[in-house]
Image: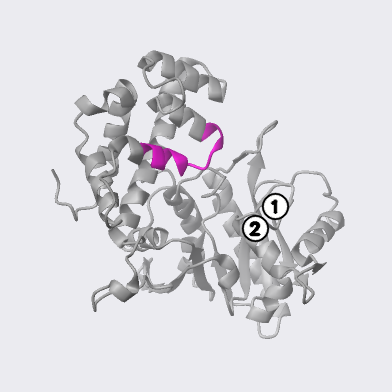
Amino acid sequence: MAHPLHPPDHAAVLAEVRTTRRAGVVGLRGLATPELSRVAALKSSGAAGSRPLTVEELLRAAVARTGGGTLRDAAELSLGLADGTRDRPAADRRRLAARVYGVSVERFRKHHELMVLGQVAEQVLLIAAEAAAGERRPDPADAPAHFALPAAHRVLTPLVHGRRATVTVHVHSVDLLRDIDVVVSPSNVYFALPAPYKSSVAATLRRAGARKDPTGALVEDHLHDELREWAVRNGMPGRAALPGTVAATSAGALGDQGVRRVYHAATAVPRPDSNDYDVRPVDVTRSVTAVFALLARESPAHTPPLRSLCLPLLGAGRGGLTPVESFGALWTAVEAELARGAPWDIHLVVRRPARADLVARLLAGPGTAPAAGGV
């Protein structure tokens, strides 16, 4: 078995997940799964007094984090985690999973299945990273003297075309940002904002940008109302924009925190007859490129000029992209902008330290992030 501190290898984890698919969870006891077993043990060690986590429980936790919808359903069926499938033959489980996507068994085997299992492996890696980073920490009062909380802000200096750039990573909710000129909000192609009580980046920004009276009652829904006005001005109410379109609004109440503009980037295309979305890496790149173009046009009209820009990992939520896919697509546009000597102050915002660790690893290379489909 690999050293317990050695990070798990994606290829090895994916191979074990694929082996589990063939055997089903009912056959796990007879399988050799050293990487999955090591991650399960690592996660268990973070909670004092807890019993050891089984590989099946680890897989269930990983599948639960895939975001729901067809991806989660297909993963549960493929691995035998769905009700009534535990002892079904692998061929039956594959057939049921193919139905989720409405494709033939052969099409599912060649394309969808590897994507689904790859997403499960990605979540296993994130679970491992979180456990290694100690996200579930003991009470600080009982911690040793060297105990320290994860940094809420990290300054990275990646090499971009022979020059050092500065990228600040904020590790907290997007509504806690301060003194950032422009914050980018992911949007669907209809520029319809989610309900403010939801937990997405767009919903959080909508909620934070709204004005409320002293009792908490809504007075002005700035981002929602301005975005609707933008759609009317551009002849688009009820009509889908092209992916990559960017709409600008004020920051509403976020102006009190030094945020001056919100750029809504249309990256998500709703699936017909469902609550799910599709986001393509190429549309993330196109959106971020459009964000920079809009920033260049708007900046001189403001006093002082707009300079700082903060990006979330577009499409890495319900859009279905892995964090690596999202960052790879996003960084393609950021790197091109920095390479030409653009003056922007670049920021990224993520909620979890494990995502910040991932970004730091991706930017630690020779100046290029992996391709959008890589892991």
| Quarter of the rendering containing residue 46 | bottom left
Dot 1 or dot 2: first in sequence order is 1
Q: Residue at x 70, y 62 (%)?
A: 206
Q: Is residue 53 left or right of residue 307?
A: left
- Label 1 with label 2: CB-CB less than 8 Å: yes
Relative depth, front residue between 101 and 64: 64
User: Relative to 6, does residue 253 appear above or below in the rendering?
Assistant: below
Drawn side of residue 363 relative to residue 45, left or right: right
Q: Callout 1: 10 Å neighbours few (<14), some, many (20+)?
A: some
> In the image, which residues are magenta?
59-71
Q: Which residue is mark 2?
A: 202
Examine the rendering and report whether any part of residue 354 can be seen.
Answer: yes
Q: Which of the 4 image quadrants contains residue 306?
A: bottom right
Q: CA distance from mark 1 to mark 2?
A: 7 Å
Residue at position x 80%, y 44% in the image: 239
Res. 365 in view: no
Foreground of the two, 283 or 256: 256
Q: Nearer the viewer, residue 336 or 10?
A: 10
The number of numbered badges drawn on the structure is: 2
Badge 2 amino acid: Ala
As drawn, the residue found furthest toward the bottom would be 304
Give the percent coordinates (x, y) of residue 192: 74, 51
- Name the secondary structure under disc 2: helix
Question: Residue 211 magenta-drawn?
Answer: no
- Circle 1 is placed at which residue position? 194
Q: Secondary structure at mark 1?
A: loop
Colour mapping: one colour
